[in-house]
Amino acid sequence: MHTSTTRRGSGVRRCAGLLLGAALAATALAASQATAASNGPTLPAPTGSHQVGTVSLHLVDPARRDPWVAARQHRELMVSVRYPARDADRYPLAPQMLPGEAAGFDALNNFTGVPKGRVDWSATRSHAHEGAPVDRRGGPLPVVLYEPGTLDPRSLGTTLADDLASHGFVVVTVDHTYDASAVQFPGGRVERSVLPKECAATKGEPAAITALLKKVMAVNVADTRFVLDQVDALAAGHDPDAEHRPLPQGLVGALDPHRVGMFGQSSGGMAALETMHEDPRITAGADLDGVLAYEQGDHTPGNPFPVATAGLKRPFLLMGMDGDNHHTVPSWGQLWNNSRGWHRDLTLRGGQHASFTDAESLLPQVARQLGLPASTVRENVGSIDPGQAVAAESAYLTAFFDQWLRGGSGDGLFDGPSPRFPVIDYVR
């Protein structure tokens, strides 16, 4: 879980962190845009051979009322699809965050020591080209879903999503409406998180907090299974967003519904493995520093997820910040001991919880722009070199999904410690 001084949103973030974010929101929203850093930070370039295209989709689930806002008769989500593209230079680069999304993120993010209203989070561009045609050479493409941590937007995983797409995967990144800090829909409508209010309503009572954590995860898993239905529809040749915009050329029918993986950071990693437990369509999953228990502390025993109790027979990967592994995180240990399939545990030496997000590369740049002390970077993303962290995360995720969705060798990275990536500790 998150504490306001050391970590961002491990699992479902601490209610204290949520309340802190809510208290600061008014100040952030009132801040003058003129004070924002004018030159947006940049994201690392993808390492694969493919150009990257992207499209955002507005998905509506007519079978569910919104679980957070009773007035909403149907559950609505926004997702982005990243994919290998061709002739992409003729298409504009997509922003990392839309303006409404960026304002909501600025209001509720609680990066330690980063002042509100000083960073224009909408100024950063991704490496994906909006609407570029799909490169379908080689047949149907394997699919990987990505989910962010609680309160975070899907766009905070842009680096890893773009990198996987550059290696030939279709990556679907998911926003959980009213959980994420802000979700911007077509036409400019923005829906902000209700979690600060929901957290305040618990009044700090342990049973109420546990019930809220369970609801958050149940909603996220239900959302994910609905998104999997849309992947099936796209694979079968149906456009799930036909009313709002045409899809890029070649995307319909390009997805392989029989080769689907999933990963996420924090509660997104939790959702990845819990969805694997509940839905056989997920072939392989990776959890990036997400505790698998309804507890507010990563190292607190008790209240394990069903996936931790039952274990998995399909391949999964655990990647933890420095100090987090299946020996130190009780819920990870339960999953490890109860699983019979292929599994590996890796630690990012010198990394912090947010090192598995775009914060790893963005915050050092923000700190330089705003003249923030080096301690601000260390408290948020650790002491690891950002380039080494991103390179290692990208390489191991690509190797993992290549091995289990395309029959690759894993590039030898899962046989033991690799001299290519000394920042990764192989945990036995």
Image (cartoon, rainbow, N blue to C red):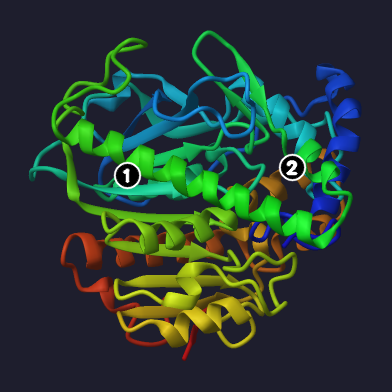
Quadrant in which the N terminus is drawn:
bottom right
> How far apart are labels 1 and 2 at the CA level?
26 Å
The amino acid pointed to by label 1 is Ala
In the picture provided, is 37 more to the left or to the right than 175? Answer: right
Q: Which residue is mark 1?
A: 165
- Relative horizontal placement of residue 284, taking residue 258 as reference (left or right): right
Whether residue 418 can be seen here = no
- Residue 224, visible in the rendered structure: yes
Residue 105 sits in which quadrant? top right
Residue ID at (68%, 80%): 301
Say which residue appears at 80% left-offset and 36% top-offset: 197
Left or right, residue 119 beside residue 143: right
**Residue displayed at 43% across by 25% down:** 93
Q: Pointer 1: residues within 10 angstroms few (<14), some, or many (20+)?
A: many
In this rendered view, identify the residue nearer to me: 20 or 76.
Answer: 76
Query: N-terminal of the two: label 1 or label 2?
Result: 1
Residue 191, placed above or below residue 385: above
- Mark 1 lies on a secondary structure that is helix
Most foreground residue, 244 or 400: 244
Q: Check the image and report above or below for 243 versus 296.
A: above
| Mark identifier at residue 136 | none
Q: Residue at x 62, y 81 (%)?
A: 330
Residue 98 position within the rendered picture, expressed as x and y whole percent measured from the top left: 58, 23
Q: Is residue 321 left or right of residue 407?
A: right
Dot 2, how many residues are within 10 Å of its Cα: few (below 14), some (14-19), or many (20+)? many
> What residue did someone put label 2 on?
366
Q: Position of residue 427 (x, y in %)?
A: 50, 87
Query: Image height check: is 283 above or below 137?
Result: below
Q: Kindly indicate the quadrant of the structure image that contains residue 418.
A: bottom left
Give the residue type that dot 2 points to. Answer: Val
Q: How far from the left and from the top, in percent, is residue 232?
A: 22, 38
The residue lying furthest to the bottom in this view is 428
